Image: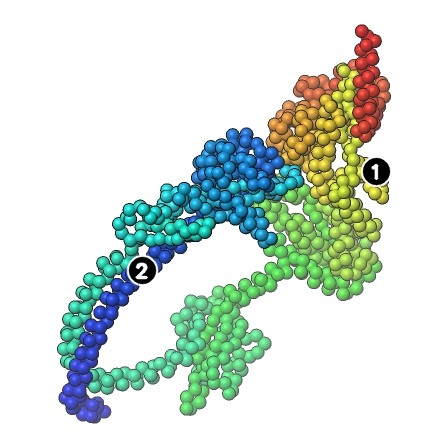
């Protein structure tokens, strides 16, 4: 065969050689011509590209410069918005112009020029007249138009007054030959609800940013653009290429110029010599290759023959591995027609842990098995010739671990028939385990491992389908942990998670095997107790649960104490629907938490009615706040030394449209629970301060602050707002707080009280003696006075123990330089005894019940007249 090929294909190479040589010569001539033309075109293209690159560079620089201008505008808009939509700016520059606030205190003065380089700051009234101006950091009386040289207001107002426009706009004008950005925004109170709005047209704030050559140069340098400036026609033109950008400014054109980078010049400098060198190199290479090509022409036919032989050998090899390559994923195997392994790939030991030698000759069914079918029957199924896949086969690893794989097979078919099978096995153990984990987490709480709401719902509905009876009811128990939030606050959420994990373990120990405990979320749990034979079992179970949860939790070396409240609903006694049972148990839980905690209550229909009444009362309270259905009465405080009224305590009343006049104890607790106490307190503060300023000349007015509200720093702002709006001297406002209001977070309470003292108000401790105060508590907190609770006064003067207690408290208060007020004084004997013990002030029904403002004014006038008459009689 080889001799035949040489005689027929290679024995007469001369003719072929001459044909090949002539072809090569013509091809070389054509190649040289094309190469020369290519280099000529390349040089001209290079020059064109260089020029185009220069233009593109200038255009890009122009776009960057425009972007710099837009960024400048955005920064200007952000700054003017921050200042214009500022509540204090509204109060000091719109309601009244206060240069002291704006310029002297640097709220809107020279800092804008020093920090942001804004040359002009103007405040205009609704008639476009300048009310306040700062020019280049100096307070000025010049108007915007006078300083700017033109009036941009029509353009700005036209843009701002469009229906879809924001209360903020800007424009560009010329100022002394330079572009100037002018931004305008309406002055508003922003989101400051404490700033009182006034009627009339809005004032506007105007910022002017003059882009002189220095600023333009800085803007350009931020984007790598050098020597940016305004182009001047009569100025000498600098050397080198200059890029330009024309801007429309109020109907005129302004041209900016900069030094062009000229990247095309560098391209020509480096590429043109390279092209020339490359042209000569290619010519030399073509000459050398032509000689080499002519030499190798004779070898062409022989090489073609050898290549054909190689292709036949390669085709035989490729057929075997093509089928394997199409199915290969992880480890590859081959079997004979009896399904015994004949070959295993090197990945087999690494994935399964088994050795290859141990499994060669073993049947594939001894290693793997399929779900719900015979693996051998599936592999040998007749009539199958292509690739097939089977999902989720199982096998055991060498460590006897359960693993999963997908397999793909193809029969090896020859003219004699099927001689074996080739296949792959893809290990998907991690995927299967992940799916199982996802399935588990979809029905269980990840933190505690308890069933979640979904699993609880399935369990409950399954038990309800079994139709519990009155003799064997099902109980739904809603459980909420008491005092759990302080655990997270004091010890961190990691400690809280450990507590929840331990709680779940204790709850599991309390229930039976056929019961279920689930985590509802947060610190809420659900217990479902089916098939209750003995109704006393629930009482025993609830008592056991509370006892378990009252035991201390040892977390990170700390003893943590919590508790629990439980609400119970029964099926079918209360409901047979899962949603109703959960709702009723929640209602019972709410009632349990509000009636003392660490207890359990069974649901009754009256609880639902009470919840409805509470919601109705809450809605009425919100309506009362909206319609201001409240009024204030005042109970005077009597000074025992001057025999005059020196202060009055403001007490709120609710004039309910259906229930009549309601006392504070009938709605304040609800207001605290619903978060409405802040709105009520704000109304009381503002009303009491206004009444004191307008009608109670010289008298102090005291306002009670609830313990819930005293935890928030918002009370400081509300008190400041009330004093500012009423113009009341802070020294005439007294804030009454109970002892226990400051005990929850003493450090925060102390900082809050110091802030109130800095305002100038006085602080009184109300109901002294009923809480947990100590001497250090009185010494460390900045109280100005204490009010003795009426429970100490009621036994006077008959009870010596009451007299002794009051005498000691008065002495204690005076030792700390505190004023002493006795509450609940109702008899003349109590008054005389308190005067003997040198008590400072009294308050109670003996002097007066709470009264309206007008009655208090008359009462005060009568007492003052009587005191004046006694003084005249003495003289």
* Circle 1 crowding by C-alpha within 10 Å: few under 14, some 14–19, many from 20: few
Q: Where is residue 415 in the image (x, y as percent from the top left)?
A: 41, 91
Q: Nearer the viewer, residue 731 or 382?
A: 731
Q: Position of residue 220 (x, y in %)?
A: 37, 48
Query: Which numbered disc, 1 or 2, marks the residue closer to the eye?
Result: 2
The N terminus - image quarter: bottom left
Asked where in the image residue 321 lies, by quadrant, the reply is bottom left
Answer yes or no: do the residues labelled 1 and 2 have beta carbons within 8 Å?
A: no
Q: Where is residue 94 in the image (x, y as percent from the top left)?
A: 59, 37
Q: Mark 2 points at which residue?
A: 53
Q: Is mark 1 on a helix, strand or loop?
A: strand
Q: Which mark is residue 661?
A: 1
Hey, which residue is sitting farthest top in the picture? 875
Q: Nearer the viewer, residue 155 or 423?
A: 155
Q: How is the image coloured?
A: rainbow
The C terminus - image quarter: top right
Q: Which mark is residue 791?
A: none
Asked where in the image residue 679 lies, by quadrant, the reply is top right
Q: Is residue 203 above or below residue 400?
A: above
Kindly identify the residue that appears in the image at 82 percent across and 61 percent down: 469
């Amino acid at each position: 065969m080889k001799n035949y090929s040489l005689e027929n294909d290679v024995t007469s190479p001369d003719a072929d050689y001459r044909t090949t040589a002539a072809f090569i010569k013509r091809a070389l001539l054509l190649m040289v011509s094309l190469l020369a033309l290519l280099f000529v075109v390349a040089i001209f293209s290079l020059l064109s590209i260089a020029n185009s690159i220069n233009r593109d560079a200038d255009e890009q620089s122009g776009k960057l410069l425009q972007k710099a201008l837009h960024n400048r505008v955005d920064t200007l808009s952000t700054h003017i918005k921050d200042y214009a939509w500022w509540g204090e700016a509204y109060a000091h520059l719109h309601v009244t112009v206060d240069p002291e606030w704006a310029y002297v205190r640097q709220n809107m003065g020279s800092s804008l020029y020093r920090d942001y380089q804004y040359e002009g700051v103007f405040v205009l009234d609704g008639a476009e007249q300048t009310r306040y101006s700062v020019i280049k950091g100096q307070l000025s009386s010049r108007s915007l138009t006078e300083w700017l040289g033109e009036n941009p207001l029509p353009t700005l107002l036209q843009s701002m007054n469009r229906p879809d426009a924001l209360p903020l706009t800007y424009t560009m004008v010329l100022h002394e030959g330079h572009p100037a950005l002018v931004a305008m925004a309406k002055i508003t109170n922003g989101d400051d609800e404490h700033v009182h709005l006034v009627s009339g047209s809005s004032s506007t704030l105007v910022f002017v940013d003059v882009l002189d050559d220095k600023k333009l140069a800085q803007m350009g340098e931020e984007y790598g653009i050098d020597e940016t400036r305004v182009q001047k026609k009569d100025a000498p033109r600098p050397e080198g290429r200059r890029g330009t950008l024309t801007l429309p400014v109020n109907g005129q054109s302004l041209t900016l110029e900069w030094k062009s980078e000229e990247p095309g010049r560098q391209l020509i400098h480096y590429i043109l010599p390279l092209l020339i060198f490359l042209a000569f190199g290619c010519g030399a290479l073509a000459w050398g290759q032509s000689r080499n090509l002519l030499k190798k022409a004779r070898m062409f036919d022989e090489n073609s023959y050898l290549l054909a032989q190689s292709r036949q050998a390669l085709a035989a090899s490729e057929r075997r591995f093509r089928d394997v390559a199409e199915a290969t994923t992880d480890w590859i195997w081959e079997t004979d027609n009896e399904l015994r392994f004949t070959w295993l790939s090197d990945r087999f030991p690494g994935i399964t842990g088994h050795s290859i030698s141990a499994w060669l000759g073993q049947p594939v069914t001894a290693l793997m098995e399929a779900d719900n079918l015979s693996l051998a029957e599936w592999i040998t199924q007749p009539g199958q010739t292509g690739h097939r896949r089977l999902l989720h086969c199982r096998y055991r690893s060498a460590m006897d671990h359960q693993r999963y794989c997908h397999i793909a097979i193809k029969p090896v078919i020859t003219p004699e028939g099927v001689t074996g099978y080739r296949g792959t096995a893809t290990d998907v153990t991690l995927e299967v385990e992940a799916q199982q984990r996802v399935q588990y987490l979809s029905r269980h709480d990840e933190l505690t491992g308890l069933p979640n709401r979904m699993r609880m719902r399935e369990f409950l509905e399954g038990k309800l389908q079994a139709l519990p009876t009155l003799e064997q009811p099902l109980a739904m128990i809603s459980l909420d942990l008491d005092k759990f939030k302080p655990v997270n606050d004091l010890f961190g959420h990691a400690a809280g998670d450990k507590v929840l994990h331990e709680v779940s373990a204790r709850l599991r120990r309390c229930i039976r095997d056929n019961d279920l405990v689930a985590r509802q979320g947060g610190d809420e749990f659900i217990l479902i107790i089916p098939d209750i034979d003995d109704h006393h079992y629930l009482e025993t179970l609830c008592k056991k649960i509370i006892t378990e949860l009252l035991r201390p939790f040892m977390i990170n070396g700390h003893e943590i104490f919590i508790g629990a409240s439980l609400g119970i609903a029964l099926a079918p006694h209360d409901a047979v629907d899962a949603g109703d049972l959960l709702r009723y148990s929640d209602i019972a839980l709410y009632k349990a938490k509000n009636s003392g905690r660490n207890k359990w209550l069974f649901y009754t229909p009256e609880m639902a009615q009470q919840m409805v009444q509470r919601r109705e009362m809450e809605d009425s309270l919100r309506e009362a706040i909206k319609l201001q259905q409240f009024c204030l009465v005042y109970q005077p405080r009597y000074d025992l030394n001057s025999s005059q009224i020196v202060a009055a305590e403001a007490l709120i009343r609710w004039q309910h449209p259906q229930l009549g006049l309601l006392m504070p104890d009938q709605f304040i607790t609800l207001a605290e629970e619903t978060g409405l106490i802040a709105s009520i307190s704000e109304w009381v503060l503002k009303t009491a301060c206004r009444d004191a300023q307008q009608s109670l000349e010289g008298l102090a007015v005291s306002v009670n602050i609830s313990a819930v509200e005293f935890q928030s720093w918002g009370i400081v702002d509300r008190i400041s707002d009330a004093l500012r709006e009423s113009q009341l001297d802070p020294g005439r406002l007294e804030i009454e707080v109970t002892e226990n209001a400051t005990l929850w977070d003493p450090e925060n309470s102390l900082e809050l009280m110091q802030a109130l003292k800095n305002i100038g108000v006085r602080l009184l401790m109300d109901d002294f003696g009923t809480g947990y105060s100590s001497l250090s508590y009185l010494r460390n907190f900045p109280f100005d006075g204490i009010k003795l609770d009426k429970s100490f006064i009621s036994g006077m003067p008959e009870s010596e123990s009451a007299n002794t207690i009051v005498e000691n408290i008065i002495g204690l208060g005076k030792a700390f330089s505190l004023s002493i007020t006795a509450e609940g004084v109702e008899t003349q004997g109590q008054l005389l005894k308190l005067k003997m013990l040198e008590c400072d002030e009294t308050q109670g029904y003996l002097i007066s019940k709470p009264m309206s403002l007008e009655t208090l004014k008359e009462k005060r006038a009568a007492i003052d007249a009587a005191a004046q008459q006694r003084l005249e009689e003495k003289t």
